[in-house]
Image: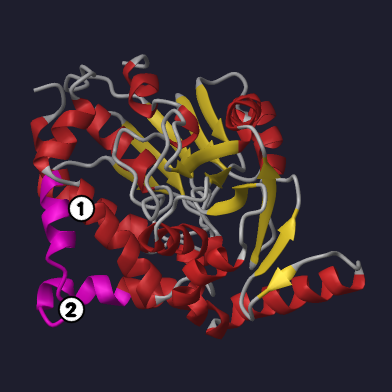
Amino acid sequence: MTANLNRFNALEKLGEYLRNCDFEKPLYFDLQDKISQAIAANGWFTQETILNALSAWGKVLTKEALSIWIKPHHFSIQSQPKTIALILAGNIPLVGFHDLISVWISGHQALVKCATKDEFLIPFLAELLEKEAGEKGFRFTKKTLVQYDAVIATGSTNSSRYFEYYFSKYPHIIRKNRNGVAVLDGTETETDLKGLGKDILQYFGLGCRNISKLYLPKGYDLNLIFGGLYGYAEVIHHPKYANNYDYNKAVYLMSEYDFLENGFILLRAHHAFSAPIACLHYEYYTNLEELKQELSNHKEQIQCIVSNCAIANKIPFGKTQEPKLEDYADGINTLRFLEKLS
């Protein structure tokens, strides 16, 4: 075994717990309480989005998937485990959980600072892991981080500059804003386009794996994009999303931008990868090979690419929020980073 067996089994048990989630059973009463607290604390969190996140983790925390994930690495039970400081984002539910379980399976200890808007779900799942394994692995704090050996921090592009400076003397992984993009060629099926709608609007488009930029062949019918998005029209009933939609529409109108809209999302031709909430950028291309080179030149701004085209590491439509355990954020292998600290 290339990892602590107790910790491995605890992850597998957690996956089973999440896959069999039933709030009619007493076993899940505490989880429902944490979900309610999380919704109260974060206006973007809903019962549906939290359950989506929990379900996604339940799918990947299987014995087979965990074995594939850790197979290339060699961790032993740490006689003197390192303390890894984790600074987590809070844009979508459980967004920092991969870092947490990476430290857990590596045998190290995690000193965790959750986002102020997501302080309930991750500590609860961490406690379940500790109880199942019969050992401590996490310490949560709201104070300034002290006494740690390495850092994994996730934030905005602006905060990443602060992180780079503040943590420069420690081994570190610093993550900043990235976005998902989609490359279409006009051969997409109705199912593909519905999947694209999910990739754009799941979690209200707030995740770094959400699609915020489309590349379309010259002359592409934008009504096809609206058709794929139609099944997600209910997002406009969420107050925070609706406020952003109204605000950005007003900005577009006052700025006299050319744009299209369908009552719940705004489409604008723009070169930027990142789009405001409730907005989607698009750009036309004429040569796929030139586009692939352009995407490669800007790879540090891109989290994932959805396409049916022959593009390296592409993701199928509808699957951006279902990464495998080995699909590391920013393409940085977290387990290899932790392995080198041993």
User: Where is residue 284 shown, x and y percent of the image?
Assistant: 68, 46
State whether residue 165 appears in this view.
Answer: yes
User: Where is residue 340 shown, x and y percent of the image?
Assistant: 36, 14
Task: Check residue 291 in the rendering and tell me which mark sits there, or answer none.
Answer: none
Q: What residue appears at the point 68 percent right and 75 percent down from the top-left corner?
A: 245
Q: Please, which residue is most extreme toward the right here?
A: 255
State whether residue 7 appears in this view.
Answer: no
**Mark found first going from the N terminus, 1 or 2:** 2
Find disc 2 in the rendering and name its residue: 23
Label 1 close to label 2 by CB (< 8 Å): no
Please name the amino acid that badge 2 sits on: Phe
Q: Secondary structure at mark 2?
A: loop
User: Where is residue 112 shown, x and y percent of the image?
Assistant: 43, 44
Image position of 234 with respect to 122: above or below: below
Is 92 a magenta residue? no
Q: What residue appears at the point 47 percent right and 74 percent down from the top-left corner?
A: 232
Is 19 a magenta residue? yes
Please name the amino acid that badge 1 sits on: Lys
Q: What residue appears at the point 38 percent right and 39 percent down from the top-left corner?
A: 99
User: Where is residue 118 shown, x and y percent of the image?
Assistant: 46, 61
Q: Secondary structure at mark 1?
A: helix
Q: What residue appears at the point 28 percent right and 61 percent down from the top-left corner?
A: 54
Image: magenta residue range: 12-33
Query: How much space separates mark 1 and mark 2, taking CA atoms?
Result: 18 Å
Quadrant position of the N terminus in the picture: top left
Q: Compare residues 69 and 167 and report the one nearer the observer.
A: 69
Q: Compare residues 125 and 236 and report the one nearer the observer.
A: 236
Find disc 1 in the rendering and name its residue: 59
Q: Compare residues 331 and 311 and report the one nearer the observer.
A: 311
Q: How many marks?
A: 2
